[in-house]
Image: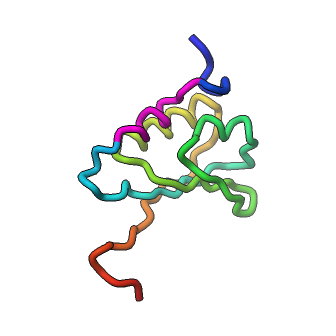
Amino acid sequence: MRCALTPGTPTLIAMAAKDTATGGREPPRYEIRVRGPIGPTIMQAFPTLAERRSGQDTILIGPLRDQSAVYVVIHQLEALGLQLLEIRRVPTRDPERPAQ
């Protein structure tokens, strides 16, 4: 079994992202705050998420198709020894309503 950080190895998040059974809707977006910086090697464990710094913390941002995908991220963070500070769902714009 290869490590999830080995290039070319699909992670659970990447496999979950391939499942597009969202009924035609975009999956909900999340912001996940983690203590400290996250380097490019560790970011490979989160291929569907982008990162940005906020003070001493890192915020991972991106779509997670369902609650199980959220738990996958939590598990990955724990396995990598990262301290989870906050998870919040970011409101998405309703395509039926015009932008204000």
From the top left corner, tell me how far across and down residue 76 is, in percent.
Answer: 54, 33
Query: In percent of the image, x 38 and y 73: which residue is there?
Result: 93
Q: Which x, y percent locates residue 75?
A: 50, 33
The N terminus is located in which quarter? top right
Q: Front-most of 56 and 50?
A: 50
Residue 62 percent location from the top left of the image = 51, 54
Residue 33 relative to residue 35: left or right: left
Q: Is residue 48 above or below residue 93?
A: above
23 sits left or right of 60 in the view: left
User: For this view, does 52 lie left or right of residue 47?
Assistant: right
Magenta segment includes 11: yes
Q: Quadrant of residue 18?
A: top left
Q: Which of 36 and 93 is in front in this view?
A: 93
Quick one: which residue is furthest to the bottom in this view?
100
Please tell me which residue is depicted at 37% across the width and 54% down the height of the picture. Answer: 27
* Residue displayed at 27% across by 76% down: 96
Residue 94 drawn at (x, y percent): 32, 73
What span is colored magenta in the figure?
9-19
Main structural element of the magenta stretch: helix, strand or loop? helix
